[in-house]
Amino acid sequence: MPVHNHFYTAQPPGGQPQPFPQGLQLAGPCLPVQVEVPPALAAQLQQTGQAVPAPLAGFALIDTGASLSAVDGTVIQQLGVQPIGMVLVGTAGGPQQQATYPARFTFPGTTLPAIDFSSLLGANLAGQMVAIHQGPLIALLGRDLLQRFVLVYNGPGATFSLSF
């Protein structure tokens, strides 16, 4: 079973890198992600001689509180992907109607496989930054995705692992 391990470390002046639990706490279990148009849409664009939009990069936060994965609405709009439906979701602010979209996630610099979503939520993640990684949070990885993986969150060790 392949495993992706992510370590949060800090290196004191003149010392060796050490586990940095505060880094994991501050950033959360985040992965680099690229959001792409779904393969069917990419094929359709190519057949009609249109350019396939370049993937948009940022970070994805593993969110065990989310039943469904989500992508920032502005990201999916920049890719030109049209909504395919609406769903009622429970949020911290109460129930909300949110659009759903098809998309593909890839995880650069990891061994994780690409994931094709037939339907994921559009969400407002505007302005959410992963400070420790110095990049924007553009996706949430919910339990719909996690059902394919084994997640180990090791707070004291400042690591998280995904097995697939």
Image (cartoon, helix red, strand yellow):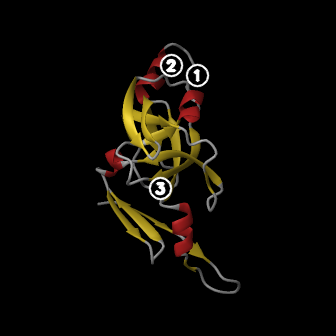
Tell which of 85 and 115 is nearer to you.
Answer: 85
- Name the residue carrying label 3: 110
* Residue 36 seen in the current view: yes
Instruction: Kindly identify the residue that appears in the image at 64 percent across and 59 percent down.
Output: 131
Instruction: Kindly identify the residue that appears in the image at 55 percent across and 25 percent down.
Output: 52
Spatial CA distance of label 1 from label 3 is 27 Å
Q: Vertically, is 153 above or below 107? A: below
Residue 69: % across, % down = 41, 43
Residue 164: % across, % down = 31, 55
| Disc 1 to disc 2: CB gap under 8 Å | yes
Q: Vertically, is 9 above or below 129? A: below
Q: Residue placed farthest to the top in the image?
A: 48
* 7 sits to left or right of 120: right
> Which label belongs to residue 45?
2
| Residue type for callout 3 | Thr
Residue 134: % across, % down = 66, 56
Give the secondary structure at mark 2. Answer: helix
Spatial CA distance of label 1 from label 2 is 6 Å
Q: Vertically, is 122 above or below 42? A: below
- Name the residue carrying label 1: 51
Q: How many marks?
A: 3
| Residue type for callout 1 | Ala
Q: Residues within 10 Å of mark 1 (few under 14, many from 20)?
A: few
Tell which of 155 and 151 is nearer to you.
Answer: 155
Give the secondary structure at mark 3. Answer: loop
* 48 sits to left or right of 129: left
Give the secondary structure at mark 1. Answer: loop
Instruction: Kindly identify the residue that appears in the image at 56 percent across and 69 percent down.
Output: 23
| Residue type for callout 2 | Leu
* 82 sits to left or right of 85: right
- Mark toward the start of the polypeptide (3 vs 2): 2
